């Protein structure tokens, strides 16, 4: 099983870039005003590109370039315009009803679960200290005053100051933090035990371990795993009843890279955010959390920035 997972993880960064490219194409045609009333949870309205003022010839050219591999290993492309699905193609053996591992986009869905926990009153402030969420861990390695200062907001922005390195070595290398957490007997404690390398909030390291901590927080707040919470309070409302969320040691939800969804269901999640948390007249996530979690908190190279487990990208 470990070798099976590492086979997928070895292509992690490349696949994430490809998915983000496809996501930009999907959602750049949408605006909040377009998503208010048109979408039926179980039915999709179809239209031709020209009927929705899109250049079908350009889309045909794009389609051919994807098939030729000019944009890498893209598996699907969906475009919605004015509430209509105007383009839907699948590539390299993938199909509409096939679950697809969405890798680190799992992190943004986990962010939505934190927003739901805030809406439920389970979390009252993002200033709450990280360690206070985990009273079951009486003994934590490398505990010092810096680690005791880590706040929930630091976890959401990946500014905890905890040591983490998932890019310098291949995922199959024992020095890689992903390899190490996957081989640990307790994913949450593995992260909590890490040494500090800078003061919380003063720098940023891309740290999938932060997202695993969010899974542990959800488990302690609700008494159920994050994937069960997601199904009950998020996916069911969107009409998403077929998915797969991998788990780690002790059954912890793999909130870092483990969710598998169908492309149309990914579009539903995007539409929920574009509609500021409303779905067919029902409030699923507060508008405040949608806006707060997708704000810029950390500047990253190349014009990118980071919110609460959301990337902001220059178009």
Image (cartoon, helix red, strand yellow):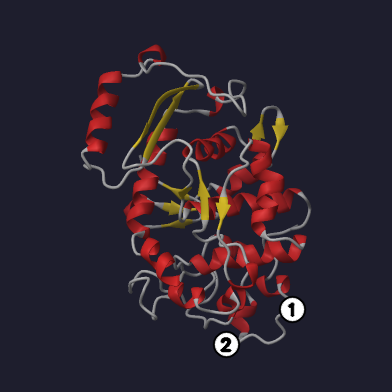
Residue under the image location 47 percent in, 19 percent down:
46
The x, y position of residue 1, in whole percent, is 46, 69
As drawn, is 272 to the left or to the right of 96?
Answer: right
Crowding at dot 2, Cα within 10 Å, few <14 / some 14-19 / many 20+, comes out as few
Residue beneath the point at 35% across and 51% down: 17
Q: Is any atom of residue 309 visible in this view?
A: no
Q: Is residue 145 above or below residue 280?
A: below
Label 1 vs label 2: CA separation? 17 Å
Relative vertical location of residue 58 with respect to residue 111 in this rendering, above or below? above
Residue beneath label 1, please? 136
For disc 1, the neighbor class at 10 Å (few under 14, some 14 to 19, many from 20) is: few
- Sequence-wise, the earlier of marks 1 and 2 is 1
Residue at (61% x, 36% y) in the render: 276
x then y, percent, for residue 299: 42, 56
Mark carried by residue 142 = 2
Residue 13 quadrant? bottom left
Q: Position of residue 192 (x, y in %)?
A: 60, 78
Q: Dot 2: what SS?
A: loop
């Amino acid at each position: 099983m470990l070798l099976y997972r590492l086979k997928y993880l070895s292509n992690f960064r490349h696949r994430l870039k490809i998915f983000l490219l496809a996501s930009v194409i999907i959602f750049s045609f949408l605006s909040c005003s377009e998503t208010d009333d048109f979408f039926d949870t179980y039915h999709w309205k179809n239209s031709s590109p020209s009927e929705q003022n899109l250049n079908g010839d350009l889309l045909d050219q794009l389609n051919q370039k994807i098939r030729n591999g000019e944009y890498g290993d893209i598996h699907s492309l969906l475009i919605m315009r004015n509430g209509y699905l105007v383009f839907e193609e699948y590539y390299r053996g993938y199909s509409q009803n096939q679950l697809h591992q969405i890798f680190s986009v799992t992190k943004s869905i986990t962010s939505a679960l934190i927003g739901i926990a805030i809406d439920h009153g389970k979390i009252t402030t993002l200033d709450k200290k990280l360690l206070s969420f985990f009273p079951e861990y009486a003994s934590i390695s490398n505990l010092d005053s810096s680690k005791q200062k880590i706040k929930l907001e630091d976890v959401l922005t990946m500014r905890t100051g905890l040591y983490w390195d998932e890019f310098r070595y291949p995922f199959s290398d024992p020095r890689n933090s992903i390899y190490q957490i996957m081989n640990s007997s307790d994913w949450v404690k593995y992260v909590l035990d890490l040494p500090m390398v800078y003061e919380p909030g003063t720098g940023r390291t891309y740290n999938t371990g932060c997202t695993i901590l969010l899974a542990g927080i959800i488990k302690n707040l609700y008494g159920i795993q994050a994937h069960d919470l997601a199904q009950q309070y998020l996916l069911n409302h969107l009409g998403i009843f077929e998915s797969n969320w991998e788990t780690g040691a002790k059954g912890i939800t793999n909130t870092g890279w483990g969710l598998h969804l169908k492309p149309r269901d990914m579009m539903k999640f995007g539409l929920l955010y574009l509609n500021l948390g409303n779905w067919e007249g029902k409030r699923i996530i507060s508008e405040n959390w949608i806006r707060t979690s997708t704000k810029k908190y950390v500047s990253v190279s190349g014009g990118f920035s980071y919110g609460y487990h959301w990337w902001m990208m220059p178009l």
